[in-house]
Amino acid sequence: MDPATIAFSILGGFVALIVGGELLVRGASNLAAAAKVPPLVIGLTVVALGTSAPELAVSVQSCYVGKTDLAVGNVVGSNLSNLLFILGAAALVAPLSVSGQLFRLDIPVMIAAAAALYALGADGELSRGEGITLTIAMFLYLAWTVTEGKREGKALEEELADLTPDPVPATWRAFVANGMSLVGGLILLIGGSDYLVDGCVVLAERLGVSELVIGLTIVAIGTSLPELVISVLASMRGKRDLAVGNVVGSNVLNILSVLGLSAIVAPDGVNVDGQSLRFDIPLMLAVSVVCFPVFLTGREVTRPEGAAMLLYYLAYLAWLVYSFAVVGLAPGYGSLAGFLAPLAAAMVWLAVKRRRGG
């Protein structure tokens, strides 16, 4: 491929993924609404899975063609992007609040899922059996989320109002239209992921970097765009709980559903690269843990904390580029310790300052 073809393949893939994900969510949501599924359940399941559709399409396609490093990089990079870039951007628009359900369920599950990924991948791969285990855990998580959401009642349903469809008539015309939207979305997701993976594999070869790095950076940011749009719009509209819940839920589903299903379809399991075990996955886990006291203190993410998250994410990207382009070595445990120290110090200082009313 020449440079123009590579760029077209990657950009075209991203566009197809975003449009396809939107059509898929709209069609599935309307079909569920026509079947009298409660809006709360639609918001907590169909829409939640829909925001992870680009990651799922890219990761499954990557594993199907044997490029499993790209799948792992996509998920880990997307989760870091969600926590640092997307939450940071949304918090700059307006301080974000954290609901009680997030503390009781979603945030602990997000941390547990990240820890499980590190533990399961410690032997260098995710097997098909481990993929089935992660997928079963996804269904249990969704069922628990719906059960807890019903306890939240009217307040949570109002939070999700913008994401759930209006009442849909149960007519054949509506059924066909929404069915076509769903199928069209699937076709775009499959085609877009094919183009994107092909372009990224060639780009990695041309730049002389691993597919893991491409997955952690370009692919991760691109497939996180649906979460970015939802979180920023939610913040602008004053739905501050939804902005945080969208990110946390997406992180859980990226590991449980995306990597779970990817491990099932991969012929020889999903390879977990040594670099990701030494730096990227532990960093994802550590960032998840460090963010917990930020959420806990005052149950919100302030603008200064959002700015700190954004700066930290930019530093992470810069360090990856420096490590491979200048040093020529993948970052390891030493880089991890050096990276976590300033993040932990900054977050603790901001949390203490806020609690003291500073």
Image (cartoon, rainbow, N blue to C red):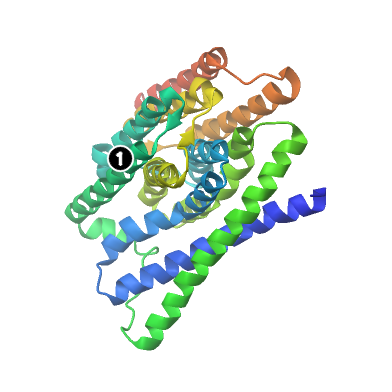
Amino acid beneath label 1: Thr
Q: Residue reaching furthest front?
A: 267
Q: Quadrant of the C terminus?
A: top left
Between residue 251 and residue 122, name the one nearer to us. Answer: 122
For this rendering, which residue is in front, 168 or 10?
A: 10
Query: Visible in this render: residue 18?
Result: no
In this rendering, is residue 227 above or below 305?
Answer: below
Identity of the residue drawn at 47% across and 76% down = 180
The residue pinned by badge 1 equals 133
- Helix, strand or loop at disc 1? helix
Q: Is residue 353 left or right of residue 304?
A: left
**Where 302 sits versus 26, above or below?**
above
Question: Percent from the top left, x then y, of residue 53?
Answer: 47, 55
Relative horizontal placement of residue 234, taking residue 34 as reference (left or right): right
* 205 to the left or right of 156: right
Residue 67 in view of the camera: yes
| 196 versus 114 height, above or below | below
